[in-house]
Image (spheres, rainbow, N blue to C red):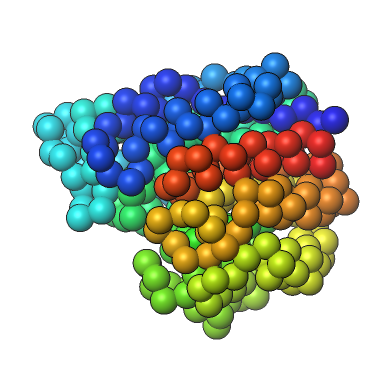
Amino acid sequence: MRKTGFVYSPIYLKHDTGSHPENSNRLTAIIKWIEKENLTEKLINLTPIPATVEQISLIHDKEYIHSVKEACETGIKSLDADTVISEDSYNAALLAAGGVITGIDAIFEGKINNAFCAIRPPGHHAERDRTMGFCIFNNIAIGAKYAQKKYDVRKVFIIDWDVHHGNGTQNSFYDDPAVFYTSTHQQYIFPGTGIADEIGEGDGKGFTMNFPLPQGQGDKEYISLFKKRIYPEIINYKPDLIMISAGFDAHIDDPLGSMNITSEGFGKLTDIICEASDKVCKGRIVSVLEGGYNLEALGESVVFHLKSLMDG
C-alpha cells in the first residue's frame, strides 16, 4: 500500500461563487465520499500553505497577480464572463497553488509516495496574464515549475484528462522540452484549443500531445488510449515526476461534458499511470483537482482515484 497524501483546507470553501457550477459543494461532496468509504484514516492529511507571489510568478505576470488581488479587495464579482470571485478568492487561489506545492514537498521529503490535491479554484485554463474558464492561477503549471526549481527535477510529465483542454498549461510549456503535456478532451467544446497537430514548438516540439475525442467516448476507449498511446510516452520520456490535471467532467453523468467515463473508469486510468510511475519515477504522482460538476459522480470518482493511488 502506498502512502497517499490528501491536500485540503476549509479555506477553499471561502472562494464563494454562489450557484455557479464550480462551487464549494464540490469539495464538500468529495469529503463526504471519503468519509463514507472510510478512507480518512488511510490518507495522510496535508495542510496547505499559501503560495508566495514569487512562486505564482513562475507562471504568471506580477501585474496580473496584483490585478486579481485588487479585484477581490474591491468587491468585483467576476474576472470574466465565466470566472466568479468573492473577497476571499485571492487567498483561496494562493492556497490552491500552495496546495500543489505542499504535495510536491511531501513527496520529495519522503513523507508520501503520491498526493491528491482537493483544491479550488481550479487552474488549467489560466493563462500567463488572464483568468479563464473558472481558473485564476494555473496550479499544476506552478507546481511543475516549482518542482524543477526546488528539487532539480529534470522532466515532468503532465496528463490532463479533464473533458476540456488545458490551454493555459499547454501554453506554459509549449516550447519547453522539460515538461511533456498530454491532454484527452472532448473536441469542439470550450476552450476550442487542443487539436491533434498542436505538438509544441521550438525545443518543445514533440513534447505536447493532444487527443481531441468525439463525444460519447467511455471507459473502453479511454483505457485503450492510455495503454496504447500515453503509457508508452511516459516510459519513453522517463520523467522524474508525473502530474495529473484530474478533472472528472468526462464522467457519464457530468452536466458540462458529453463523455461516458464511469467512476470506476477513472480508477482504471489511475492504475495505468501508477504502473508507469512505478517504472520511471519511483511512483511520484501529484494529482490536482480540476473540473467535475455532478456532485455524486465527482465524489465517487475521486474515491476510485484515491483507492488506485493508494493500492496501485
Please tell me which residue is depicted at 27% across the width and 44% down the height of the picture: 20
Residue 43: which quarter of the image? Answer: top right
Judging depth in this view, the residue of 261 and 91 nearest the camera is 261
Residue 2 x %, y %: 81, 31
Q: Nearer the viewer, residue 6 or 180?
A: 6
Residue furthest to the right: 279
Residue 230 rendering spot, x and y as whole percentages: 72, 66
User: Which residue is rendered at x = 85% and y = 46% of the image?
Assistant: 278
Which residue is rendered at x = 37% and y = 27% of the image?
13
Image location of residue 228, percent across then percent down: 78, 71
Task: Determine whether 178 is above or below 299 in the image.
Answer: below
Compared to residue 51, the image places residue 134 above or below, namely below
Instruction: Count the labels in the image.
Output: 0
Nearer to me, 1 or 197? 1
Q: Tell me which residue sits at (60%, 22%) in the image.
A: 35
- Is 62 situated left or right of 242 in this image? left
